[in-house]
Every structure is written in C-alpha cells, then in structure tokens.
Image (spheres, helix red, strand yellow):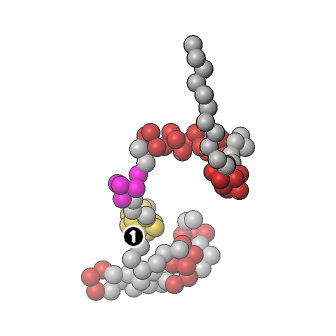
C-alpha cells in the first residue's frame, strides 16, 4: 500500500535516541506486538517499516525433511490419509505374525 492510498494518516514524532511510536491501530492491523522485529528501509525518500519474523537456524527443515513434507502434502491432496480413529483402531488390533515362505 502506498502512502497515497493510505486509508488514514497517523503522525508520530521522533523521540530521544531516534525512537518512533507506531500507532496502535497500525500495530493491530499488522499483528505487531511489543518485542517483534521490524525491517527499516529508505524507499523513495520515505521510511518503510516492514514486520519481520526471525527464524532460528535450528527450526529450518533440511532438504530431506522438506522432501518428506512435500510428499506428505501431495498424499493429502490425493486423499491418501488415515483418520485418527482409523489409526487407533489399527494400533489396537493384535499384531499378526506372518510366516516366511520356504524356498
């Protein structure tokens, strides 16, 4: 959304240590809370502030894990899934021993 198309304009003032208060309605609209991170850029002579979510490197999936997630999502789209009720039923059934065929 550009400044020209903003629904309502709010004013803030630059305080000590260059702090700027983001109006409450803007924070609510963007889901910003105290302690959240924002990216600050200069764009066309204006200050652009974007909400940012920082991701811990330990929370990133490995390529193998990403492939497993993609396969699982594809199975769900094809309707290949088991309900929790079905899973519980299968787990409650006694295991069936299978004999090996003699060669």
Confirm whether residue 87 shows in the render: no
State the predominant SS element of the stretch in magenta. helix
Viewport quadrant of the N terminus: bottom right
Q: Residues within 10 Å of mark 1 (few under 14, many from 20)?
A: some
In the rendered image, the vertical position of residue 72 relative to residue 20, given as above or below? above
Q: Nearer the viewer, residue 61 or 2?
A: 61
Q: Nearer the viewer, residue 32 or 91?
A: 91
Viewport quadrant of the C terminus: top right
Relative side of 3 to 57, left or right: right
Q: Residue at x 43, y 40 (%)?
A: 63
Instruction: Give the magenta part as a residue range.
Output: 56-60
Q: Position of residue 24 (x, y in %)?
A: 51, 84
Relative side of 39 to 88, left or right: left
Residue identified by numbered label 1: 37
Confirm whether residue 11 shows in the render: yes
Q: Residue at x 40, y 69 (%)?
A: 38
**Residue 19 is drawn in which quadrant?**
bottom left
Q: Position of residue 7 (x, y in %)?
A: 62, 76
Q: Secondary structure at mark 1?
A: strand
């Amino acid at each position: 959304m550009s400044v020209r198309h903003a629904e309502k304009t709010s004013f803030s003032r630059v305080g000590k240590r260059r702090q700027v208060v983001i109006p409450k309605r803007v924070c609510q609209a963007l889901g910003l809370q105290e302690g959240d991170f924002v990216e600050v850029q200069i764009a066309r002579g204006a200050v652009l502030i974007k909400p940012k979510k920082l991701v811990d490197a330990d929370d990133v999936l490995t390529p193998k894990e990403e492939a497993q997630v993609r396969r699982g999502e594809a199975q769900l789209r094809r309707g290949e899934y088991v309900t929790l009720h079905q899973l519980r039923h299968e787990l409650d059934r006694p295991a069936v021993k299978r004999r090996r065929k003699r060669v």
